[in-house]
Image: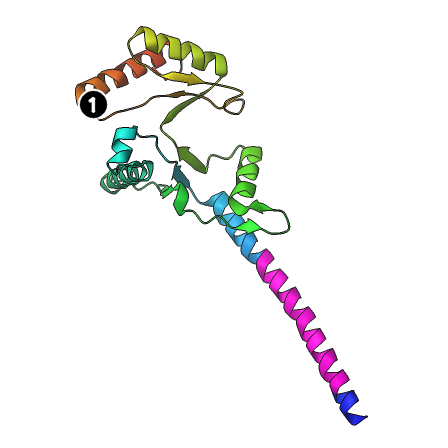
Amino acid sequence: MRFSKIWEAVSHFWLALLKSGLSIGAVLTFVLVGVLLIESLTKRTITIEPISVPAALAKNGYSSEVAGLRLRDALLHYKANAHSKMPSPEFDLKGELPDIVVPAVGLSVDTIASFIRTFLRSTVRQNVSGDLIIGDGKLTMDFSRELFKEGVLGTGIAFPTVPEGKARIRTIMTATHTKEELEQALGVLKSVGKRMGILAN
């Protein structure tokens, strides 16, 4: 009889400990997700998306990840040499960011933060993808046609291929382009963009 009372007391103790442990674990998980969400919403970050590279370069080891790393290194170099007192953003590669999934919701913290940033129209985090995002679909397609008339191929991409308001021009750089050709293409992009009111004069 005494043994059964001891067993019952131990069972109650372990049950209470288990319940409180789960409650503490749930609270700690909630706090951790909250901290990560707040950091994701407030940290000024430029995320470098994987950059498309020609198949010949990728075959020789110059993959989209390498292109992203090179771009980040160049941006960090410019940031270090800017000698600015203004706070500058962090540069992250897409694959380096932690992507923790909230079990009860089934969404990652980054996805939830992205929804909130979109809702609040926040520009704290920006992406670099190699695309020139114009926004308006018709203006993007007109811009693409004008570039082509000037000898630059910039493919217009609009809804439904990309979300409404995210229309863009996609350009592709290859290893066969010379520095002069790239400078000429940038000059055309700039002049046509100014002429069409996409870039400020």
Q: Position of residue 92 (x, y in %)?
A: 37, 43
> In the displayed image of the protein, which residue is found farthest to the right?
1
Which residue does the image show at 27% across and 35% down from the upper left? 59
Which residue does the image show at 32% across and 6% down from the upper left? 149
Residue interval drawn in magenta:
7-30
Q: In the picture shown, does residue 171 fall above or below 57?
A: above
Q: Amino acid at mark 1?
A: Thr
> In the displayed image of the protein, which residue is found farthest to the top?
149
| Residue under pointer 1 | 176
Which residue does the image show at 71% across and 74% down from the upper left? 16
Quarter of the rendering containing residue 154: top left
Q: In the picture shown, does residue 33 fall above or below 28?
A: above
Q: In the picture shown, does residue 22 fall above or below 71?
A: below
In front of the other: 115 or 129? 129
Side (left or right) of 52 relative to 2: left
Q: Position of residue 29 (x, y in %)?
A: 58, 58
Which residue does the image show at 49% across and 24% down from the upper left? 166
Magenta-drawn stretch contains 10: yes
User: Crowding at label 1, few (<14), some or many (≥20) Cα neighbours within 10 Å?
Assistant: few
